[in-house]
Image (tube, helix red, strand yellow):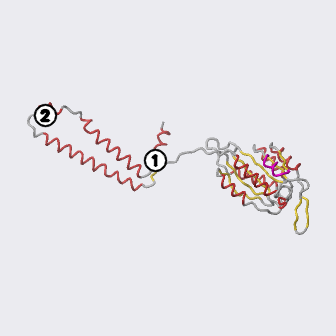
Amino acid sequence: MGEVLNSFVPKAFEFPDRMLLLLVIPLLVGAYIFAVTRKNKRGMRYTNTSMLQAVIGRQSSWRRHLAFGLSLLSLITLSMAFAKPMNEVMVPRERATVVLVIDVSQSMQATDVKPNRLAAAQAAAKAFVESLPEKYNIALVAMAGSNNTIVQPTLERSAVLRGIDTLKLQDSTALGGGIAAGMKALSSVPKDPNDPDAKIPGAIVMLSDGENQTGPSPVNEAAKAGEQGVPVYTIAYGSDSGFVDLDGQRFPVPVNKEQMQEIAKQSKGQFFEAATAHELSVV
């Protein structure tokens, strides 16, 4: 019962100086007492008070003061409302989170997926973000040689969509680092106040052509994620005929499906593949 009452008692006021209006209350009470006392003295001038009572009837003392008491209560309430009371209330926050890890390495400029792998991934990621239930948090990680969390877990879909638009090609690829960055983003989700040790209900969705070049072992990082109950859903897109032209030379960039399959397996996630923009949107 005490906890319930405490939740209704304001801890502070936004404009505490407005509470000075309550100083008027004692003045009004004093004025009322003075007026009632004076009225009683004037009534004593009647010599035949029994006749007067017969004419106006006997009044209950509490009824005479009820209107004044209610007026004071209203004034107190309005004064407190005018001061804008504030309180701290625990509001539950959704903790279910999906982290999008998108490959932005140079191989993503291959045009085997039209218009190119990165543009197709961006379009598919946007469609995915807009399809998720509103209560899910979404985070965005750009994966290359270094991995950057572009958007921390948020319910704001517009922020994630803008983040996807800002993705630019970078050098190298670190799949393991991308998974580690995704796990770090998940760790920023607030803990459950009722169970601080509870695992965060989350998942990682990785869109990549699957070729690892640097950083920690992606298989080991996937296993760590699986041990913490975070599955990694991998989407390998592109074809074996993909290539990029860099510094006047042509380099083949085939999709490493086996790598992506193993990441999904070790994390207890699922593996998907897409060779076209249409297949990617279906996935």
- On the picture, is 26 further left or further right than 188? left
Q: Secondary structure at mark 2?
A: helix
Query: Label 2 is placed on what type of residue?
Result: Leu
- On the picture, is 223 further left or further right than 37? right
In the picture shown, does residue 156 fall above or below 246?
above
Q: Residue at x 53, y 46 (%)?
A: 89
The local crowd at label 1, few if under 14, some if 14 to 19, many if 20 or more residues have their Cα within 10 Å, is few
**Residue 177 point in image, percent of width and height:** 79, 55
Front one among 95 and 270: 270
Q: Residue furthest left?
A: 47
Residue 208 within the segment the image draws in magenta? no
In the picture shown, does residue 99 fall above or below 53?
below
Query: Label 1 is placed on what type of residue?
Result: Pro
Disc 2 or 1, which lies upstream in sequence?
1
Front one among 6 and 167: 167
What range of the chain is rendered magenta? 275-283
Q: Nearer the viewer, mark 2 or mark 1?
A: 2
Q: Residue at x 69, y 58 (%)?
A: 162
Determine the main secondary structure of the stretch shown in magenta.
Answer: helix
**Residue 81 point in image, percent of width and height:** 41, 49
Residue 282 within the segment the image draws in magenta? yes
- On the picture, is 103 further left or further right than 8? right
Q: Residue at x 13, y 43 (%)?
A: 42
Q: Which residue is mark 2?
A: 52
Total marks shown come to: 2
Front one among 217 and 208: 208
Q: Which residue is mark 1?
A: 10
